[in-house]
Image: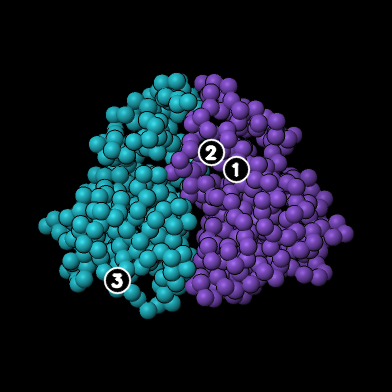
Chain colours: A purple, B cyan
Amino acid sequence: MMLRFKDIPGLRFAGLRCARQRSQHAVTRSKGPRMNVYLTTLLPLAIVPIRGDSFLFSSSCADRLQGTMACSLQDLAFLEASKAAEIDEKLMGPLGFSIDQLMELAGLSVATATSEYCAQNLQRILVVCGPGNNGGDGLVAARHLYHFGYKPVVCYPKQTAKPLYQGLVTQLASLDVPVLQELPSAEAIERDFDVVVDAIFGFSFKGEIRAPFADIISTLKKISKPIVSVDVPSGWDVNEGNKGGVGLEPAVLISLTAPKLCAKHFKGHHFLGGRFVPPAIRDEFGLKLPTYPGSSMHVLLHSKL
Amino acid sequence: MMLRFKDIPGLRFAGLRCARQRSQHAVTRSKGPRMNVYLTTLLPLAIVPIRGDSFLFSSSCADRLQGTMACSLQDLAFLEASKAAEIDEKLMGPLGFSIDQLMELAGLSVATATSEYCAQNLQRILVVCGPGNNGGDGLVAARHLYHFGYKPVVCYPKQTAKPLYQGLVTQLASLDVPVLQELPSAEAIERDFDVVVDAIFGFSFKGEIRAPFADIISTLKKISKPIVSVDVPSGWDVNEGNKGGVGLEPAVLISLTAPKLCAKHFKGHHFLGGRFVPPAIRDEFGLKLPTYPGSSMHVLLHSKL
């Protein structure tokens, strides 16, 4: 039994809207029942907020979807790299967070947003982790993706000796998630993976891309599989975007805490994660954060499916 | 526009089943559109798994709901207190987790499960925190409940000086979540709160209930508002249940990692959270863990709504 959107009065508009937005990519992913394309594209917004005051079948559903999905880039505030660093310092200083907590929550939101994007069709996930916090978010995300039923493989070529990071690697080992020291070849990635999570560089990245990450980014630029970037597409200038075209061109960006300035130039599928920003930080830094649905760890800012 | 279950062929059975299960409590909560009762009761199971291979509208929906909701208590393994402590030691020893991480994930799952239970009708949440890890889970849960849009108030009479706990209190202060030193009177709780989260004692509780928690439990036993217990209903013997009837009788239990032995005697609404158990631990301790839906942090084991 399959129900189509046109059979649900409240969803007629939403269904039409979704159909208009689908790209070739979404169509490729729609090998299952046709409903699934709509569901993975739309429903997280309408349904995950279990305690929201609207719901899938309410007559105002279409308006609410419209409001959530068409979150205009103009409605967002974008953070300079230096301000993002300041927020992190405040969170881990006077606001009492430990880096373990923040990385767990950030990495979890990377996993839930990636899982929304990957749905059930993109199972084999290569998570490429850099040497710093962005890489740590990737290690956390890989663990949660395992628990969500995906098949993650981690590439972590420059491991840090800090206990937090060593612990994250130990946790992955206990799940038999492979942790590679070297990136597979472009051909092997094409063959063995459905999607690549880019957790190489975050908002502290500056200057030249150093070895081995220059080669890694160069390899990842060759593959056709979709890339999901964590916080900042690797190789991009955090404030100015993909200067000189040296950086990755991800299909998906998962901004953390708030989008960085470079995200103004990103036109793909855009999520926000890191649902822990206190109102005082929001106000002090002039952030304009959208409403997260229900108890979700991420929110869709802009859809490109 | 309101759609009824009978209008969705695949849901007919689920609708009937749900109606049969509703208790007076669920009816009290159904002041909104009638659909909402069904949705808050049923849909989290069917819809949160965005990437699951079944979905709300599939023909096998009823079977899958049946499978998930009617998770028989016989299908679960229950943990002795000593075994639960052993698992914690392994997670934080050879398996590389920090207590910050585990408490964040446990507390988050308490918040997501509580939010599923509270839906939109139970907004004012009193979180009563004990002196140990169970209380820490409560502090984390209160923070997430704030971010989910609820109005939590914390009662935390025996604060520990450890940095992690002090940080959790600082985080709540930054959100202007009140942290009380004393429990309000039974009358004030009845008037000012819709639900109470009991994060007083967890699986390490033994022996006599000490001050001030003896009085606190005695007060909480007088109120009619639903109680959501974290891991173990406070006052219960962790292995044997509510010996002598001195403990709380919660409407909801959120077991963490795996249900404790005493949960065999719990007949209410039962969630499981703490989605971080590696297969090696599951096998070594003979845990029978249900499948969590999609990227959800909790799973409903047994419904009493």
Does dot 3 land on a helix, a strand or a loop? loop
Q: Is residue B235 visible?
A: no
Circles 2, 1 touching at the beta carbon (< 8 Å): yes
Tag 2, which chain? A
Q: Chain of mark 3?
A: B
| Residue at the spot 51% in from the left edge and 21% down from the top edge | A1
Residue labelled with disc 1? A68
Task: Pick whichever, B219 or B41, lies toward us.
Answer: B219
- Disc 1 sits on a residue from what chain? A
Q: In this picture, is A198 found above or below B22? A: below
> Can residue B34 be seen by looking at this rendering?
yes
Percent of width and height locating residue B218 = 17, 61
Using the numbered discs, state the Cα–Cα distance from disc 2 to disc 1 in whole angstroms: 9 Å
Which residue reaches farthest bottom? B161
Q: Helix or strand or loop: what does disc 2 sit on?
A: helix
The type of residue carrying mark 3 is Gln
Residue at 60% x, 43% y is: A68
Quote the CA–CA distance across marks 1 and 3.
40 Å
Q: Which residue is mark 2?
A: A46
Q: Residues within 10 Å of mark 3 (few under 14, many from 20)?
A: few
Q: Secondary structure at mark 1?
A: helix
The residue lying furthest to the right in this view is A244
Mark sitting on residue B236: none
Residue B139 as seen in the image, left or right of residue A105: left
Q: Residue B181's mark?
A: 3
State if disc 3 and disc 1 touch (CB < 8 Å): no
Of the 4 image quadrants, the one containing the C terminus of chain B is top left
Specify the amino acid type for callout 1.
Thr
Q: Nearer the viewer, residue A13 or B130?
A: A13
Residue under the image location 59 percent in, 67 percent down: A284
Q: Distance of mark 2 from mark 3, alpha carbons?
A: 39 Å
Q: Which percent across, then down, holds residue B199?
A: 31, 61
